Amino acid sequence: MLEKSKVLTQIQNAGIVTVVRGNSKEEAYQTAKACIQGGVGSIELAFTAPHADEVIGKLNEEYAGDADVLIGAGTVLDPQTARVAIIAGASYIVSPSFSEEVAKVCNSYTIPYIPGCMTPTDIQQALTFGSEIVKLFPGSIMGSSMISELHGPFPQVKVMVTGGVKLDNLAEWFDKGAKIVGVGGQMVGPAALRDFEKVIENARVFKDQVNEIRHSNTDKVLL
C-alpha cells in the first residue's frame, strides 16, 4: 500500500476522481475498468455497490503494477465500513459528510480521509482531525464561488468538488480554486445500459479537458 503522502499527491496530480457505483458487483467492476482504460485511474468505489469491498480487492489485484491506478472507497458512513474498505485495500476513504469516528479509523491506518463538507464548521472539523483534502458536496448546490470564499478563512484547504461537475463547468470549478473534481453519472452513466465503451470515451474526454484546463491555468500564473 502506498504511503499516505504519496496517495494524496497522486490524487492531486490526477485532478479527477471518478465515482463508481453499480447495481451489481460485475457492473461496478466493469465500470471502474472502463474509467481506467479511459485514463481516469483514481477510482472512488462507492459502498452503495453490492460487495464493494470485493470489487476493491479485485481491482487492486488486477492493477497492482500500475502506478497510475488508485482505488479508494466512497460513501463510507461509519467506522466499520471504513475498516472493511481499508482491509480490502482501499487507498483512501471518501464520505458524503464528516465523521469523527471514520476519521479516527483512517488516522489509525494512516489512510487519507476525504469527508464531504458544506460549511466552515465542517471544514474546520475535518482539518482538525487530519484531513488534507475536503470534498465540497454537493457542488451543484454550493456553487463554485463557495471555494474562493472558503479560501479566505482556510487558504490552505485543498478542495475536491463532487456533485454537479460537468464538461461545460469544469473550467469554472478549477478557476475558483478546486484542486480536484469528482465525477459520477456524467462519466459513468452509460454503464447502467452496459455501454462500457461509452464510459471509456467519456473518461478520455473528461481527463483530456481537465489536463487542458490545468495546463492553461498554470500558464496564466507563469504569465
Image (spheres, rainbow, N blue to C red):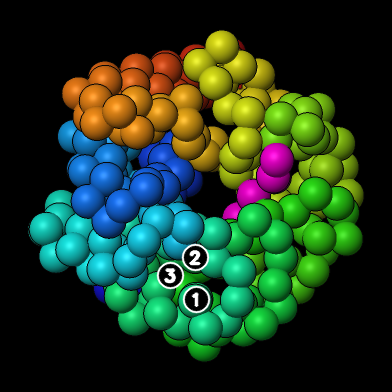
Numbered label attached to residue 82: 1
Could you tell me if residue 203 is visible in this image? no
Of the image marks 3 and 1, the number of the one nearer the N terminus = 3
**Residue 176 in picture, x, y percent from top left:** 71, 27
Instruction: Give the class, few, some or many, for how many residues have Cα within 10 Å of label 2's Cα (few <14, many ≥20).
Output: many
Q: What residue is rendered at 78% in x and 58% in y? A: 123
Looking at the image, residue 223 lies above or below residue 221: above
Mark 2 or 1, closer to the camera: 1
Q: Amino acid at mark 2?
A: Ile
Secondary structure, mark 3, is helix
Q: Amino acid at mark 1?
A: Ala
Q: Amino acid at mark 3?
A: Lys
The residue singled out by tag 2 in the image is 93
**Residue 157 in picture, x, y percent from top left:** 70, 52
Q: What residue is rendered at 54% in x and 36% in y? A: 181
- Magenta residues span 133-138
The residue singled out by tag 3 in the image is 4
Magenta highlight on residue 113 = no
The alpha-carbon separation of the residues under discs 3 and 1 comes to 16 Å
**Residue 11 in picture, x, y percent from top left:** 43, 49
Which quarter of the rendered picture does the N terminus lie within? bottom left
**Residue 168 in picture, x, y percent from top left:** 56, 11
Please say if the residues under marks 2 and 1 sit with CB atoms less than 8 Å apart.
yes
Which quarter of the rendered picture does the C terminus lie within? top right
